[in-house]
Amino acid sequence: MSDVIDLLIVGGGINGAGVAADASGRGLSVLLCEQGDLASATSSASSKLIHGGLRYLEHWHFRLVHEALVEREVLLRKAPHLIQPQRFILPHRPHLRPKWLIRTGLFLYDHLAKRGQLPTSRALPLLANANNPLQDSLDYGFQYFDCKVDDARLVVANAMQARQQGATILTRTRCQTAHRQDGLWHVVLEDINSGMRHQYRAKALLNTCGPWAQSFIEKRLKLNSPRHIRLIKGSHFIVKKLYSGEQAYLLQNDDQRIVFVIPFCGDFTLVGTTDTEYKGDPSAAAMDSNEEGYLLEVINACFTRQLSRRDILWRYAGVRPLCDDESAKASAISRDYTLELEVGDDGSAPLLSVFGGKITTYRKLAETVLAQLKPFLPEMAPDWTADALLPGGDISGDIGGSGTEAYAQWLHTQMNNYPWLPSTLLSRLGRAYGSQLSEVLGEARDMADMGPCFGADLYQREVEYLLEKEWACSGEDILWRRSKLGLYFAASQVEALDTFVGELTQARLR
Ligand SMILES: Cc1cc2nc3c(=O)[nH]c(=O)nc-3n(C[C@H](O)[C@H](O)[C@H](O)COP(=O)(O)OP(=O)(O)OC[C@H]3O[C@@H](n4cnc5c(N)ncnc54)[C@H](O)[C@@H]3O)c2cc1C
């Protein structure tokens, strides 16, 4: 990297990683620092949907929904291994929203943007039979389509693309301070593990600190924040598969909110989310007992099978950093993003801060960020990401083909290429790594070559790949972000994995 970096990005969630991928592909020199693991904050705590946001239509956020629906198609093509179409059933509850209102909403949802890969919505009688897990009173509904995503792996895929294009990605590295001097940013980064500090100079600074965006400006840069953000906590829980079938549900609740119920990692069901004001350290956010009770009540009012707190296997919470538009209700604050540009006295050394946003719109956000930075970095190449595959997405060699169909065909070919891989393991690895599967498997020719198994179907070869190529540094990074195998691991297996990761990391440092 040359002495002065073009763009220094603080924050390795989806927005930071997305901008790093876009900017480095335009020929800019880029450094991204992340104080924890990639996607360790909001970007691994989402509802894991690439969606327009049907309910935002009720708040008249048409532009946001349109942009998100356009992106849904783009992302489905860019990463067909990480993003899949998801069928939703929306049971009708006459006292909450009339049928005509839902029909109108779905009509708009179908037509606000061009749809190449997802079917249209339709009304649906919900017949009382063994395949219908809902209570008999919910006898009518609607079907529509959105997409689900592996949020944490989408972040890693963007970071990998950035690295392939020459960007430097430093995890476990905090931006301690930064100040302007002689038309440049002078930035101090601290390695969290060693405490070592290094100085960098950059032409432009990007603040993608998510829920820390405001405090980063005030505490680390000692500047006034142009925006105030409200932290709104959203929590989810995971239970054993609640019903058979691959459909998800969008449940309407009496408080006018909605709750998602989504098939998760084959054997589980994901339930969420909540909307509660949050004060305090975003990294300490956790689901509380009220949120748990609230979600259980919604489920038990709609499904035949009744759940209790004992059924909950895993909980996670994230904090939405939403620009304060003074709405009284947390659920009514816009999910749109806001960019704020601030420059030094001589008109150079821009600071661009990102407030709010959605995973769904990260790519578009990155384009907008770079358009705003263009006057300061005029040598950057034009927009390019809409038609480019993410690492692992190269499964048909053709971005114009249907992502879903191409993925199914590709997986079939892999079964022939690796007949020795058990089909469940191949399915998981295919979804996680896409066309990078061959890199993960390396020279392995049979299961013995995969090395010892740590539990579930996690073998040493995959662990080594994650440590070497995907910035994983701990058992937690591997079990809860690069994969969700933590759902299957016993405490003793976690311990064995942690020991192995610790030893390998130490050996590398020597
Ligand atoms: C409950 C919930 C559900 C959601 N569901 C969806 C959904 O289904 N679909 C969708 O599209 N969107 C969804 N969203 C929104 C989406 O998750 C967020 O908009 C997105 O993840 C924000 O990404 P980010 O990169 O801005 O922030 P983050 O992912 O929070 O990343 C910010 C990063 O900055 C790092 N950082 C902070 N300070 C420093 C520093 N000084 N030095 C170095 N690093 C620093 C943090 O460690 C953090 O990793 C949801 C959000 C929540 C909370």
Image (cartoon, rainbow, N blue to C red):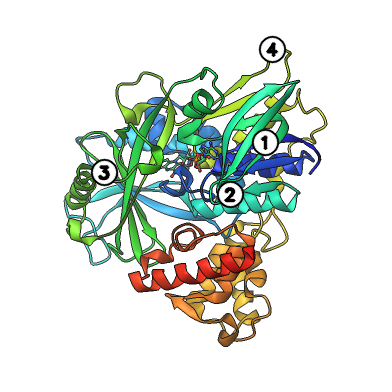
Image position, residue 131 (x, y; %):
27, 65
- Is ligand 1 closer than 8 angstroms to the Cβ of mark 4? no
Image position, residue 332 (x, y; %):
35, 27
Q: Which residue is mark 2?
A: 171
Please state which of residues 278 and 45 is positioned toward the viewer in this rendering.
278
What residue sits 75% from the left and 44% below the top? 25
From the viewer's perspective, is the residue at label 3 or at label 1 nearer? 1
Image position, residue 307 (x, y; %):
19, 58
Q: Which residue is mark 4?
A: 345
Local SS, label 3: loop
Gap in angstroms between the C-alphas marked 4 and 3: 57 Å
What is the three-letter code of the residue carrying label 1?
A: Leu
Gap in angstroms between the C-alphas marked 4 and 2: 32 Å
Gap in angstroms between the C-alphas marked 3 and 1: 49 Å
> Are circles 3 and 1 on residues that touch, CB within 8 Å?
no
What is the three-letter code of the residue carrying label 3?
A: His
Q: Which residue is mark 1?
A: 8
Say which label, 4 or 2, has the lower sequence index: 2
Say which label, 2 or 1, has the lower sequence index: 1
What residue sits 65% from the left and 30% below the top? 205
Say which label, 1 or 4, has the lower sequence index: 1
Image position, residue 78 (x, y; %):
63, 51
139 relative to 176 in the view: left or right: left
Quadrant occupied by the N terminus: top right
Say which label, 3 or 2, has the lower sequence index: 3
Local SS, label 4: loop
What residue sits 72% from the left and 32% below the top? 202
Gap in angstroms between the C-alphas marked 1 and 4: 20 Å
